[in-house]
Image (tube, rainbow, N blue to C red):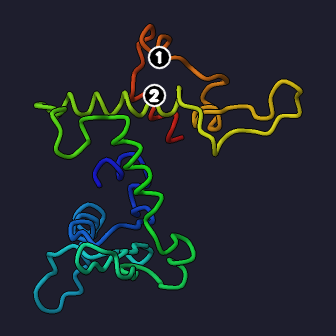
Amino acid sequence: MNQQKRRGNPDKPPSLTSDAANGYESALVKVYGVVPIFLRRGRPPTKKQAGSGWEYLQIVKHRRGGHLVKVTSKVIFGDAGTICNKLGKHTSYVERTHLTSRHMNGRLVRKTLSYSKRVEMLEASSVWEDIVYNLVRPLKTLRQAVCNERRHWFPRTPAMVAGLTDRIWTIKELLNIRLNHLFFYQHQKG
């Protein structure tokens, strides 16, 4: 959450959908929460509280015997109707992103021999995975239709769609150039 606050809006957390893990609500309040103003009655408040414009939806998966029985949504912060329309009632996008990351970065896979002893190495491998994903891998969902006899689609990467580059990079090009990941993230954010 601290990284998200530094990269995004420092005043308000982003709209968030998560699974039934308990840590998100307390992390949001810890990082973005504000201690209420003391109105000179009773003991001054010391605990941080959630803001009024926050949007957080929790997706709870109910299982019986290892099988998914039903999926319910629980609004933690925000208006139920608005939040469900904006965020949807599923976590499929987040789960797909995590699956892609685990496929590309062996250090994120559970029960594996590929692990990082130091946090710096995990961060470096995650940055490499992000750069390869955004600059090298053309995504089928981002391709553009072309009226050409030779091909029907023009492949594009996320960086091409965002306007950061005009071509698909190769791994060899990435290895021959020194990229500053902070520079890349600043352009990705802006």
Using residue 188 as the reference point, say whether residue 120 is left or right of it: left
Please rate how many residues cluster around mark 1, counting C-alpha atoms within 10 Å: few if below 14, some from 14 to 19, many from 20: few
The Cα atoms of the two marked residues, 1 and 2, are separated by 8 Å
For this orientation, the residue located farthest to the top is: 176
The residue that appears at 63% across and 45% down in the rendered structure is 141
Q: Determine which residue is flagged by label 1.
A: 171
- Front in this rendered view, residue 102 or 64: 64
Q: Is residue 86 above or below residue 11?
A: below
- Front in this rendered view, residue 131 or 152: 152
The image position of residue 157, as x and y in percent, is: 60, 33
Helix, strand or loop at mark 1: helix
Q: Is residue 146 above or below residue 95?
A: above
The image position of residue 73, as x and y in percent, is: 40, 81
In which quadrant will I find the C terminus? top right
- Front in this rendered view, residue 160 or 43: 160
Q: Earlier in the sequence, mark 1 or mark 2?
A: 2
The image position of residue 154, as x and y in percent, is: 74, 31
The numbered mark at residue 132 is 2
User: Which kind of residue does numbered mark 1 sit on?
Assistant: Ile
User: Which kind of residue does numbered mark 2 sit on?
Assistant: Val
Callout 1–callout 2 Cβ contact below 8 Å: yes
Using residue 110 as the reference point, say whether residue 83 is left or right of it: right
Helix, strand or loop at mark 2: helix
The residue that appears at 27% across and 35% down in the rendered structure is 106
The residue that appears at 33% across and 42% down in the rendered structure is 102
Please rate how many residues cluster around mark 2, counting C-alpha atoms within 10 Å: few if below 14, some from 14 to 19, many from 20: some
- Front in this rendered view, residue 67 or 50: 67
The residue that appears at 43% across and 49% down in the rendered structure is 97
Instruction: Please tell me in which quadrant of the rendered image residue 53 appears.
Output: bottom left
The image position of residue 54, as x and y in percent, is: 41, 73
